[in-house]
Amino acid sequence: MSNKRVVRSYLILLLATGFLLLLQWAYPSIPFLKDNFKNSNFLTYYLEGEDSMAFLTEKIDSSIFDQLDTIPDSTELLVDTVNTDSLPPLAYFDEAWFTNDTVPIPDTANIAALRKFFESLNSADKKKKVRISYWGDSMIEGDLITQTLRKKLQDQYGGSGVGFVPFISITAGFRRTVVHNYGGPWNYYSLVKNAKMKNGPFGINGEYMTQGKDSVSNSIWASFAAQKGKAAWNQVKLFYGKGTGKTLAQTKLNERAWSKYTLTDTSHVNVLNLSDTSIRQISVRFDSAGSTVFYGKKNKFNCW
């Protein structure tokens, strides 16, 4: 019986491959397919042989590439944007070429919308703090895009640190800018998971956490460490919200002894500042947090 299933699986695989090959061969000569479906062309090279490049380029208006040379330099765009309210032209394409395209292509660069952003960066000196928030979807989970953008901005304008990190995160395992671990019965709430919560105390990243209950231990904890080869921090800020006024926090910097703090959780957003000359790891633990709302931490070294 098992051998028959294996043979059947291979036959299905062969039939599917044959069907795809047949579609690739038949697509150019069947009007119905050309009018209603797009061809993936994944076998174009093999079907067209030496003429495959001609097959591709004949479908592209070469004037589009010629026009790319007319795009102004990025610095020119920024200068023009600061001095005028009009949007600088990016490039003018042959609209006929995009007639059948479902995605509209703008012919202007909307840099004017970032005017205040660039003005703040250009006017800031080393003593002034410029805080940047980047909102996005799954493409910035785990600091994937923002880590590069943050490094470029810090190299250009100064500053340091790895930005805001929540106490718990589903992407903690593959984030490369900080070693993040956590444990205990955390209650986790987010604008995505709890979309029907209209009045939740959501933080700047659309999330918040509270202490849960467990049959073994109610202690919740989180730890953050600098990656190997990266500079240590000299300041860490823990952000939390309102609570009972009796919440105790225990923190440990590097491998030192635990220190205890009574959280001042009377405002919607509160901060616990921790400073040291060289912080490579910080651990924080809450044994009895009650209803206190937790958000995350931010660290830095030198200037921000």
Image (cartoon, rainbow, N blue to C red):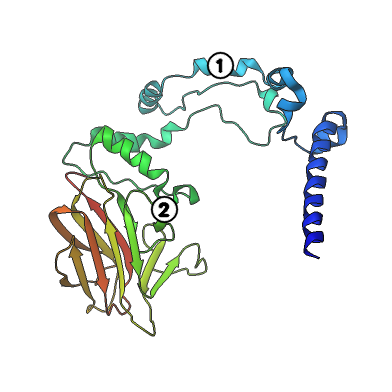
Label 1 secondary element: helix
Q: Quarter of the image holding residue 114?
A: top left
Look at mark 2 in the image and give the residue it sits on.
174
Q: Amino acid at mark 1?
A: Gln
Label 2 secondary element: helix
Q: Position of residue 153 (x, y in %)?
A: 31, 37
Tell me the crowding category of disc 1: few under 14, some 14 to 19, or many 20 or more residues within 10 angstroms, Cα based.
Answer: some
Report the disc number at residue 92. none
- Residue at 74% across, 21% down: 49
Image vertical order of residue 280 relative to residue 252, above or below: above
Q: Quarter of the image holding residue 272?
A: bottom left
In the image, 46: left or right of 233?
right
Q: Residue furthest left?
A: 277
Q: Are marks 2 and 1 in contact (CB under 8 Å)?
A: no
Image vertical order of residue 214 relative to residue 301, above or below: below
Image vertical order of residue 24 relative to residue 204, above or below: above
* Of 108 and 229, the residue lying toward us: 229
- Residue at 84% across, 37% down: 22
Look at mark 1 in the image and give the residue it sits on.
67
Distance from disc 2 to disc 1, alpha carbons, whole Å, reads 41 Å
Q: Residue furthest bottom?
A: 215
Q: Position of residue 64 (x, y in %)?
A: 60, 19
* Of 214 and 93, the residue lying toward us: 214
Q: Amino acid at mark 2?
A: Phe
Image quadrant in which the C terminus is located: top left
- Residue at 30% across, 50% down: 163
In the image, 166: left or right of 251?
right
Q: Position of residue 176 (x, y in %)?
A: 36, 49
Q: Is residue 35 something that shows in the picture?
A: no
